[in-house]
Amino acid sequence: MRIHARTPQRPRSLDDALLPLVNVVFLLMIFFLSAGRLSGPRPDAVAPQSSRDEARTAAARVLELRSDGQLSVDGDVFADADLPLRAAAWQGTPLDVKAAGQVQADRVLRLMAVLRAAGVRELRLLTIKGGGG
């Protein structure tokens, strides 16, 4: 008669059971982060850059600076030359400026200087939290 000695097996701990689950969670997280980066913004969409505060007042007028260089307010597209005349009519009304992400910063600064010279005193640059990098 032979007696085989059993080797004692190590009891499975909770950490050993959770390790595959943690691996799967991290793999899924990496997948969704990379999938979100692969699909970029639509080229015709006007998307602001980045900010802490997204709230805007209902009475504020929104001036959009599109990626093609045109300006628009409430869907009405106009040229840069018309901006000072239009901005003179906006005095006393809050103005929100929403610039497409492809617009250069110096262009936005020049636009803000024209608005200031035309008498617009309350202006906010609308941006999105997190920014694109």
Image: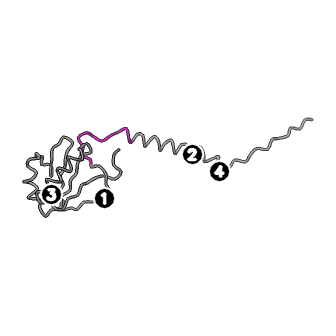
Amino acid on which the number 2 mark rests in the picture: Leu
Whole-angstrom CA distance, mark 4 to mark 3, is 64 Å
Amino acid on which the number 1 mark rests in the picture: Asp
Whole-angstrom CA distance, mark 4 to mark 1, is 43 Å
Magenta includes 52? no
Q: Which mark is residue 53?
A: 1
Which mark lies nearer to you, 4 or 3?
A: 3
Depicted 117 relative to depicted 6: above or below: below
Whole-angstrom CA distance, mark 1 to mark 2, is 37 Å
Q: Earlier in the sequence, mark 1 or mark 3?
A: 1
Q: Residue furthest right?
A: 1
Amino acid on which the number 4 mark rests in the picture: Leu
Q: Are marks 4 and 3 in contact (CB under 8 Å)?
A: no
Q: Earlier in the sequence, mark 1 or mark 2?
A: 2
Q: Residue at x 17, y 57 (%)?
A: 61
Q: Quadrant of the C terminus?
A: top left
**Residue 52, quarter of picture:** bottom left
Left or right: residue 72 versus residue 34 is left
Q: Which mark is residue 14?
A: 4
For mark 3, give the secondary structure.
Answer: helix
Q: Mark 2 = which residue? A: 21
Q: Nearer the viewer, residue 59 or 128?
A: 128
Q: Mark 3 = which residue? A: 116
